[in-house]
Image: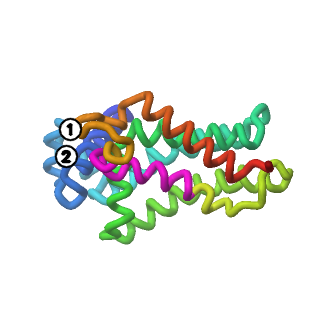
């Protein structure tokens, strides 16, 4: 199966998992929606759980490469690297809001321990990169002595809160219920600006 076909099946699965949940989506449903043979899905992925893991690896590898690029960029200062981290996460999560919802559901429900552990293992690698950026800034005295892990949790926590529910997000930002914050460029810039202000306040010496 070509890489394009494999990616097509994964992207179809993301849409179905977000709409019906993992348990509510069968391989038969997925094959029909993707317009491929059931045997083909089973042959290349083996099971729904393995398909889920393939989806995780594909999406997480993109972010890991982006974070490594930021961390290794010697032309950026430490705070510019953290600004780039904020931009990368906001842009990625808002553009992949269906995928983000699936991950959040799996972490909250913890119905499949193997899948739950796969999510944690994959994303812990990304967390370590951000931790290293913050620790380098602290070591060079560019940053205050903060808790690196909880600093990153503060960034993700804000994004997760606005991604939790479109209705709740619109209530928080005082928008009409038919407004879609996840596709609105002005709102995206608002989140980025806010998070950068928080990060600067937490990290920079005054």
Q: Position of residue 18 (x, y in %)?
A: 26, 49
Seen in the picture, residue 100 relative to 34 is either above or below; the reply is below
Specify whether residue 138 is painted magenta: no
The segment highlighted magenta reads: 153-168
Residue at the spot of label 2: 30
Q: Position of residue 142 (x, y in %)?
A: 82, 48
66 sits to left or right of 159: right
> At x 37% / y 71%, what residue is drawn?
113
Residue 34 numbered mark, or none: 1
Specify whether residue 161 is painted magenta: yes
> At x 78% / y 51%, what residue is drawn?
143
| Distance (Cα) linking label 1 and label 2 | 6 Å
Question: In front: 51, or 94?
Answer: 94
Question: In front: 137, or 191?
Answer: 191
> At x 35% / y 52%, what residue is drawn?
164
Q: Residues within 10 Å of mark 2 (few under 14, many from 20)?
A: many
Snapshot quadrant of residue 67: top right
Pointers 1 and 2 in contact (C-beta within 8 Å):
yes
Q: Which residue lies most toward the top here?
A: 185
70 sits to left or right of 50: right
Question: In front: 47, or 118?
Answer: 118
Seen in the picture, residue 195 relative to 144 is either above or below; the reply is above
Snapshot quadrant of residue 109: bottom left
> At x 24% / y 57%, what residue is drawn?
22
Q: How many marks?
A: 2
Question: In front: 172, or 36?
Answer: 172
User: Secondary structure under badge 2?
Assistant: helix
User: Secondary structure under badge 1?
Assistant: helix
Q: Position of residue 69 (x, y in %)?
A: 66, 38
Helix, strand or loop for the magenta stretch, by majority: helix
26 sits to left or right of 66: left
Q: Position of residue 1 (x, y in %)?
A: 32, 37
């Amino acid at each position: 199966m070509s890489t394009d076909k494999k990616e097509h099946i994964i992207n179809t699965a993301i849409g179905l998992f977000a709409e019906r949940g993992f348990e509510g989506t069968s391989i038969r449903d997925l094959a029909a929606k993707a317009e491929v043979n059931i045997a083909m899905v089973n042959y290349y992925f083996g099971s729904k759980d393995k398909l889920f893991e393939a989806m995780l690896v594909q999406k997480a590898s993109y972010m890991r490469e982006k974070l490594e690029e930021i961390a290794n960029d010697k032309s950026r200062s430490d705070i510019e690297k953290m600004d780039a981290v904020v931009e990368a996460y906001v842009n990625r999560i808002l553009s992949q809001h269906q995928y983000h919802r699936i991950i959040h559901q799996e972490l909250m429900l913890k119905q499949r321990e193997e899948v739950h552990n796969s999510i944690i293992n994959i994303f812990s690698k990304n967390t370590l990169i951000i931790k290293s950026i913050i620790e380098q800034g602290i070591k060079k005295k560019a940053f205050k002595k903060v808790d690196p892990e909880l600093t990153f949790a503060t960034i993700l926590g804000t994004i997760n809160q606005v991604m939790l529910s479109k209705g709740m997000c619109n209530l928080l930002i005082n928008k009409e219920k038919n407004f879609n914050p996840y596709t609105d460029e002005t709102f995206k810039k608002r989140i980025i600006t806010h998070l950068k202000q928080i990060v600067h306040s937490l990290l920079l010496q005054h």
